[in-house]
Amino acid sequence: MTRNLNWEIGGTHPSTSSDPYGHWTRVSGKDFLVDFRPGKKPYRIVLERQEIDRSDPDKLYLPFAAILDGKSLVPVIQREVDVKAEAETRLPRAEPTPGVDGTIFPVPLPESTLNETGTIADPKWCPPARCGKTPAIVAVIDDGIAFPNRRFQLPDSESRVEYAWIQDAPFDRKRNTVPFGREYRRDEIDTVLAEHEEEDDILREFGLADLLHAQQPSAFKHASHGTAVLDLAGGYDLSQAEIAENVRLITVQLPGIANWDGSGSVLGWFVAWGVQYILQRARLIEKELGMPVPVFINLSYGLSGGPHDGTHWLELIVEHLLENHRKRSDCPEPPKPDRIAELVTVTGNDFLRRRHASIKAASKGSVTLDLPWRVPPGDPSSSALEVWLPADATGIQVDVTSPSGPPLTAWPPQQPDPGAVLRSDLCDGSKDPQNVIAQLSLEDPYWAGPKKRVTLIVAPTDTDILDTQRPPAPSGLWQIAVTATVKKGQSLTAWVQREELPLGYPNRGGSGYLDDPENPRFTSPGDWSEHDYHDAVVRRFGSLSGTATGYTSLVIGGYRDGDRRLALYSGASSPETTTKLPTALLPSDCSRVLAGILTTGNRSGATFSLTGTSAAGPLAVRMLAERVGKVENKGAIKVLADLAAAGEKVIGGEPKWAPNLDTRPADRHPIPRPVTRGPELRAGEARILFKENTPTKYRLDRPVTRGRITERD
């Protein structure tokens, strides 16, 4: 089957045509994305150039796109407009392009969600009847958060959740305190808790278990990712009230359908709005209490793609919001030089998933990164691969060979001008521009960052369930070779974008993996290999989450509590990709065979085991919130380092539960040479023991029948 290339100039940075995922979602691949199909959702995110007050901590904008006239790109939610009228729009610093522009993203929100009153009011807050002397705010941004659970209440049934923002809930015009969705205050939560006996009725009252209207009512099920994370970060038994009253909670529940987006182009904006919201509410609480209140934000949301050097637009926005919050001086009491506001992220779970590749130039000149990308069959979702190059890389050429077609060489035919985006569509040979099965783009540079990006997006390999006549992409081995001229010591790196969905969502396929024959996967005894090898392009080190490389974020990995060894999936840094190291390790599994950490389900008294580094990150939040005094005196990083040192001292005196096995690759002649890696690339400051205040015990706070509360205190 023949393949044709159709070229299209994207635009000039910063412009509305820079993001390949936005262009694919709205133009080339719109028929493949059933949840984001135009016409199904009435809203879109547009990046508008607006006047910016850089001292305003509440303004959400791209700080790196600010120019001399004081303007920057600001995300604005608008209603969908006619495509013809949209095509005639000429946005500043953007070249005219046909059709809809690329960084205009579809918004996965129902029509009843948006605040169209024209105003956003400030909510009220009154100090709770029972509040500790050293309060701290624990905030969680996640999916499916059942905040009425008893683990988030005090013995008198008073909620510790000060604010809860459900981003895809119907908007209430009487409570126009958020730009979209619905916000619940503690007094509203307490009122609902007092009016209902059955916990299912409480969840339905908040729209958390509404099967008829909710987009993805994950809190309706036995367990959800958000509830489990919130419990590990700030859930307590009723017997721990003296500790619990100091830990006040703020929750942000992301839109259900937005979780389908694994690239971060859509979901990332809702995360940024969530961080902005948490810091706004924290300052409101500070004002009423008359004292600074430390804020610890848990974000167990990650990407496999991205530049991995702290310059991802989401990382820069979040860092900017945190910096402005720390330096504000409007607190009634003179705050310390840096107000405490910490973002805790996780290393991710991609260490063994073969999604990362890298090659380092031994000398100045041309270097080629060969990527054998195995795209799975029966996948109803699009897949994406990113290749990152140094900003001064020249002579870029991309060769693509699909599983069922001839090689496509010498792309692009000419190098783009600096700041331009070059994009092409790969069609199925029928001369129909709608029969695009892949999209290839080159950004020079990526936004205002120090790198260039090549992105290949492949259509689903199964379109039977998508209600479209568009042809599927061929499954199998896609061979991608990226060549560039770089300096000695510079690297070409690649990541396959993840497609895993949160707990409770149906599986929509996988993103595939890099099938490198030179990469041994197993050791001689048959265990997983945890090494990189000189002749292989696939790298385990460098699998750190793409949203965990922010300059001030705390990055937590996982280890097994039983034998004290690193969790096999826990991501790692790499000198070729980033200087960011994990901060420390906390338990994410009980043992090699007992996966996960025990936490709560969505109903009070239910238990659930959460595995992955998502279980380790909130434990760090919990430990910091319980040690506010030490954090104020030493800083969060030093507190975690001290805990790690104490943990390693105890672990060093424990007997080893399992012998060290042979780590040489099995059945390899000659035996591959492993790359020497330092332990800090995976472990950071090493392991922290977690023994005190166990999040969930093997007992119930009160009688429960079929997951429902049968009596109240």
Image (cartoon, helix red, strand yellow):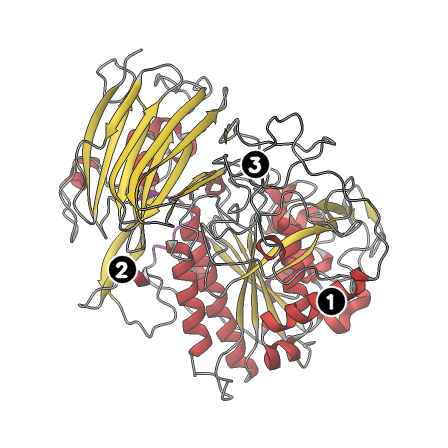
Q: Secondary structure at mark 3?
A: loop
3D distance between C-alphas at marks 1 and 3: 42 Å
Quadrant housing residue 121: bottom left
What's the mark number on residue 353? 3
* First along the sequence among labels 1 and 2: 2
Magenta segment includes 605: no
Q: Residue 283 location, x and y as percent?
A: 49, 75
Q: Could you tell me if residue 39 is visible in this image?
A: no
Q: Is residue 490 left or right of residue 334?
A: left
Q: Nearer the viewer, mark 1 or mark 3?
A: 3
Position of 429 relative to 250 (above/below)? above
3D distance between C-alphas at marks 3 and 2: 34 Å
Q: Dot 2 surroundings within 10 Å: few (below 14), some, or many (20 or more)?
A: some
Q: Quadrant of the C terminus?
A: bottom right
Residue at 28% from the left image edge and 56% from the top image edge: 448
Say which amino acid is labelled 3: Arg
Q: Residue 362 location, x and y as percent?
A: 39, 45
Q: Secondary structure at mark 1?
A: loop
Residue to which mark 1 is pinned: 154
Q: Dot 3 surroundings within 10 Å: few (below 14), some, or many (20 or more)?
A: some
Q: Nearer the viewer, mark 3 or mark 2?
A: 3
* First along the sequence among labels 1 and 3: 1
Residue to which mark 2 is pinned: 65
Q: Residue 471 location, x and y as percent?
A: 36, 17
Position of 156 relative to 41 (above/below)? below
* Highlighted magenta segment, given as a residue range: 104-116
Q: Is residue 244 left or right of residue 569?
A: right
Q: Residue 535 location, x and y as percent?
A: 50, 35
